[in-house]
Image (cartoon, grey):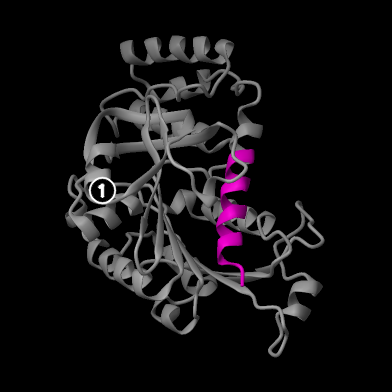
Amino acid sequence: MTLLFDNAHPQHDAPLVPTNAAEREARPGSRRRVIEIGLVNNMSDAALRATERQFTRLLRDGADGHAVRLHCFALPSVPRAHATRQRIASLYTDIAAIGSLQLDGLIVTGAEPRAAALSDEPYWDEMRALVDWAEAHTRSTIWSCLAAHAAVLHLDGVERQRLPRKCSGVYDCAQQDDDTLLAGLPAQARVPHSRLNDLPANKLTAAGYTVLTHADGAGVDIFIREQRSRFVFFQGHPEYDPASLQREYLRDIGRYLTGERDDYPDIPVDYFDAVTEQALLALRAEAESRRDPALIAKLPALTMRAGVAAAIEATAATLFRNWLTSLAP
C-alpha cells in the first residue's frame, strides 16, 4: 500500500488517493521533493485497518503543503490470521524492500503483548533489526507504545515494568522540555494511553533520553533520543481516533464475559461522561457477580465527555504536522 498525498486541496472525507497536484509535483525532475514515510503496522488483525486510517489521516492532514508518500509494511513474524496475511501480501510493500525506498521518516507501531518478556515475543529479532536499520537509514523514527519499549530495551537495556492495572484513558500531558515537536501544543495536551507496561522517567533520563511530556496517572508520554537518527517515542497513542479506547474497552469486557481474561477492565480515565460511567459501573457489578456473555446486551449507550474528541485530535494533528515539518526539504 503506497499512498501519495498533500493537503493543498484537502478532501477529508474522500478516499485516500493521490491528488493531481501531488502527482504532478512529485514527478522525476520536479523541484519539489516528496517526503517519504514508512509505516510498519504491527497492530492486531482487528486493529490493522483502523491503524492504517489513523496514521494516514494524520500524515495527510499534517502535510501542510508538502507532498508526502506513505509506504505500509508489516513484520512477517507478527502472528496473523490467514485472511490478514493475504491482505498484507496484496496491499503492503514487502519489508525486504524497505532499504531501497530512501525513507525520510518511519513510524513503527506496537503489537498486542503475548509474552511476559519482550525478548520472548515472536517478532523480537525482526524488531531489533528494524531498530538498527532505522537508526542508520532514517532522519527520524516514531516508536509507538510496545515498539517504544522494544526499542529502548534493544538500544540501552532499559526494561519496561508491568503495571498493577492497565493504563487506559485520556490524560493531560504537561511539557517537561522545549522541543520543536511540541510547537503549538496547548500547555496540557490530551493524549490517549492504553498499555500494560511502563518505562519510568528516572530510568529513561539515566540512559540519556529526554522526556518531553509527562502525565499524572500515566507517567512518561513522549520522549526522544538524538543520535544518528532522531528517535521519537510515544508511550501513549496520539494517533488514536476518539472511539479507539471505546473499542478496546468493549473488547476487554467481552473477553472477561467469555472467560478469556480474569479481571474486569477498568473504565478508561476521563473518557466517558458521568452518566455513562455510572451505567458501566452497574454493569460491572452485575458481571462480577454473574459472569455471562449474554450480559453484553446490557451495555448502555456510550457518551464521551464533552471536548475529549476535539482535544485528542488537536494534539495529534499538531504533533504530526511538526514531525513532518522537521522532515521537509
Residue 86 location in percent, x, y?
Answer: 46, 69
Residue nearest the observer in this picture, 150 or 295: 150
At x 53%, y 24%, the residue is 271
Q: Is residue 132 above or below residue 181?
A: below
Q: Is 217 positioned to the left or the right of 48 in the image?
A: left
Q: Main secondary structure of the magenta part?
A: helix
Residue nearest the observer in this picture, 288 or 178: 178
Residue 88 location in percent, x, y?
Answer: 48, 68
Q: Is 233 positioned to the left or the right of 205 in the image?
A: right
Residue 324 is covered by the magenta coloring: yes
At x 24%, y 61%, the residue is 124
At x 42%, y 66%, the residue is 74
**Image quarter for residue 32?**
bottom right
Residue 127 location in percent, x, y?
Answer: 29, 64
* Residue where numbered disc 1 is placed: 114
What is the three-letter code of the residue carrying label 1?
A: Arg
In the image, which residues are magenta?
A: 314-329
Residue 40 is covered by the magenta coloring: no
Asked if residue 264 shows in the view, the reply is yes
Q: Is residue 3 above or below residue 200?
A: below
